[in-house]
Structures are given as C-alpha cells and as structure tokens.
C-alpha cells in the first residue's frame, strides 16, 4: 500500500560537455574501458566548456586541471577526466573556474579545455565521466549519442 515510500528515485547525471556520448568500452585507455575506475560513459566533446553533471561539492580539482572529482549530495562520487593521458600537459590548455570544497549546481561551468591544443599535442579528447563508487548503485542506465552540455541526461542511477 505504501510501496512508494520505499522506492528510491532515479538520479540523473548530465552531460559535462556537448558532443557525442559513447560507451566507456570505446575509450582508448584500459583503466576506463575496463571500468577499473568505476562505471559510466565518455563524451567525445566538440566544445571545450566543462559543466558540473549534478549538484554537489568539488572534492578535488587535479593540479594539472585535466580532471575533477565531485561528491554528490547522496554520497556518490563522480570523476570527470578530460582527455586521455592529458596529465602530461601539466595544466597547459586547461582552465578551471572552481576550487576544492566549492558547492556546484548541475549545469554550472566548472572548467574549459582547449580541445584543438590537446589534439595538436597528440592526445585523445575522450572525456570519461565515471561514478567512482558505482558498486554502491542498485542500477545504472546510459543515454548515448549526441548530447548538449548541462542539459542532456547521460546516466540515470538508483543508489
């Protein structure tokens, strides 16, 4: 009779960048393609602006500005990793607009990557968006294809 009280609501993760959402298996890096860092999707971006995928707190902005860790309000952790092996750029080609412990809203601009520069340096621009503690999820589903940053839902999960 009161089943609705016990059903957990689906949570949504938005696209961090505009472009094409693809399966993690397509990412040219085993740590991501084999889901060693968690479950999720990747975006092949066509614009360098990076947006928060959900409401939460910035748990970490990597020193090299190529990656962000966000802790959502329900304790779920998200890693946004812009490009593959881009740590080697030591921050060159990246800009951040947030800092550790800052609260962010879904769709808020958090960073920018110069995609042309990254590719000219020989790096892939695949951007994995990974739920780092996906083992805590009851279910996860993906929406692949063309996406718009801060608007398109790329993942839905139940915690």
Image (spheres, rainbow, N blue to C red):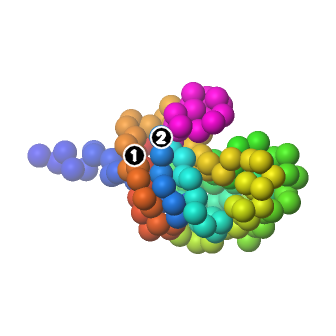
Label 1 neighbour load within 10 Å: few <14, some 14-19, many 20+: some
Q: Position of residue 123 (x, y in %)?
A: 74, 47
Q: Residue at x 27, y 46 (%)?
A: 7
Q: Position of residue 20 (x, y in %)?
A: 48, 55
Which circle's residue, 1 or 2, is located before the other in the chain?
2
Q: Residue at x 74, y 71 (%)?
A: 97
Rendered position, 24 above or below 30? below
Residue 155 on the magenta segment: no
Q: Gap in Å between the C-alphas at discs 1 and 2?
A: 8 Å
Residue 26 on the magenta segment: yes
Q: Residue at x 37, y 43 (%)?
A: 141
Label 2: element kind: strand
Q: Which residue is mark 1?
A: 142
For marks 1 and 2, give the one nearer the viewer: 2
Rendered position, 27 above or below 129? above
Q: Which residue is mark 2?
A: 23
Does residue 60 appear in the picture of this structure?
Answer: no
Q: Residue at x 85, y 51 (%)?
A: 89
Taking the image as shown, residue 136 lies to the left or right of residue 57, namely left
Q: Position of residue 109 (x, y in %)?
A: 63, 71
Magenta range is 24-40
Taking the image as shown, residue 57 lies to the left or right of residue 150, namely right
Label 2 neighbour load within 10 Å: few <14, some 14-19, many 20+: some
Q: Position of residue 47 (x, y in %)?
A: 60, 67
Taking the image as shown, residue 127 lies to the left or right of residue 117, namely left
Q: Quadrant of residue 28?
A: top right
Image quarter (top left, top right, bottom left or bottom right) of the C terminus: top left
Circles 1 and 2, Cβ within 8 Å, touching? The answer is yes
């Amino acid at each position: 009779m009161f089943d609705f009280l016990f059903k957990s609501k689906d949570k949504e993760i938005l696209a961090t960048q505009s472009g094409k959402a693809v399966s993690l298996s397509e990412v040219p890096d085993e740590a991501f393609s084999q889901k060693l860092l968690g479950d999720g999707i990747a975006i092949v971006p066509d614009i360098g602006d990076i947006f928060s995928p959900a409401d939460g707190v910035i748990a970490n902005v990597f020193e090299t500005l190529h990656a962000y860790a966000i802790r959502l309000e329900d304790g779920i952790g998200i890693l946004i990793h812009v490009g593959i092996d881009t740590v080697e750029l030591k921050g060159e080609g990246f800009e951040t607009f947030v800092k550790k412990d800052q609260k962010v809203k879904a769709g808020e601009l958090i960073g920018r990557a110069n995609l042309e520069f990254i590719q000219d340096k020989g790096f892939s621009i695949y951007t994995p968006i990974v739920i780092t503690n996906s083992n805590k999820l009851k279910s996860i589903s993906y929406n692949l294809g063309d996406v718009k940053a801060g608007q398109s839902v790329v993942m839905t999960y139940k915690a």
